Image: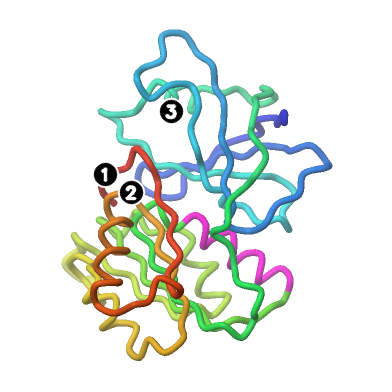
Amino acid sequence: MQVTYDHTDTIGKNIHRFWFRPPPTIDYIAGQFIELHLPHPNPDERGIKHWFTLSSSPTEELLFITTKFTPEKSSTFKLTLKDLRPGTKVTMVEPEGDFVLPNDANQALIFVAGGIGITPYRSMIKWLQDTQQKRAIQLLYAVNDLDQAVFLDLFKEYGVDLTTIVKQPPADYVGETGSLDAKRILGLIGELNNKLVYVSGPEPMVEQFNDDLQALGVPPSQLKTDFFPNYTSI
């Protein structure tokens, strides 16, 4: 499908949102992802197509994606994305994926996010808020720096049970610090019972958490994962 680039804004340290106007026929589920095509001269090995989870909710007029820029390591794709002019039409593959909310509104949910892995949860929680649905959600959000923690106002407004784990906290920070691992996840969750655990973030992190959580006794049926390629750390 063809979408029209609208604008961008910065919401955290090196973290930007890119907004697109979709065709009127678009239909998607909160938490799904898209593939964005940006042909450009002399692309590097990461190519002209990238996958992004939609941070926007189906209740919003515009689509938006959220991505982190590493100034010294940005791909030619991301540099092209950053240089888009409003009104430019680009190709976006229609949303897909099954990293979405369960149909059972009574299902207790644990959301685990590493860095940019927060994006599908923003989509889900915004959709729940806009459709006036209340679900029991505990969010464990691991970031390197506090100024890279995004969408916190929305999570607080909705009433998410939020724990932010900051690896490099400021001197006056009060809260969880250090790194997140499977044992710590289970310690913060408390009783697992029938809770459904979602894990989203850089590919190595997601694979490690998935393996380690299962090794610690979490059944595969209670785990849902979504990894972000081309990210090696949060």
For the point 41% across and 89% down, the residue is: 193
The foreground one among 86 and 126 is: 126
Q: Give the SS element for disc 2.
A: helix
Q: Quadrant of residue 226?
A: bottom left
Q: What element does badge 3 sit on?
A: helix
The secondary structure type at the circle numbered 1 is: loop
Q: Tell me the kind of residue under disc 3.
A: Lys
Disc 3 marks which residue? 78
Q: Which residue is mark 2?
A: 203
Percent x, y of residue 89: 69, 23
Marks 1/2: CA–CA distance: 7 Å
Label drawn at residue 81:
none
Magenta residues span 119-131
User: Which tag is nearer the camera, tag 1 or tag 2?
Assistant: 2
Dot 1 corresponds to which residue?
Answer: 232
**Three-letter residue code for mark 2:** Glu
Report the side of 16 relative to 18 (left or right): left
| Residue 129: quadrant of the picture | bottom right
**Badges 1 and 2: C-beta atoms under 8 Å apart?**
yes
Q: Tell which circle, 2 or 3, labels the residue nearer the N-terminal end.
A: 3
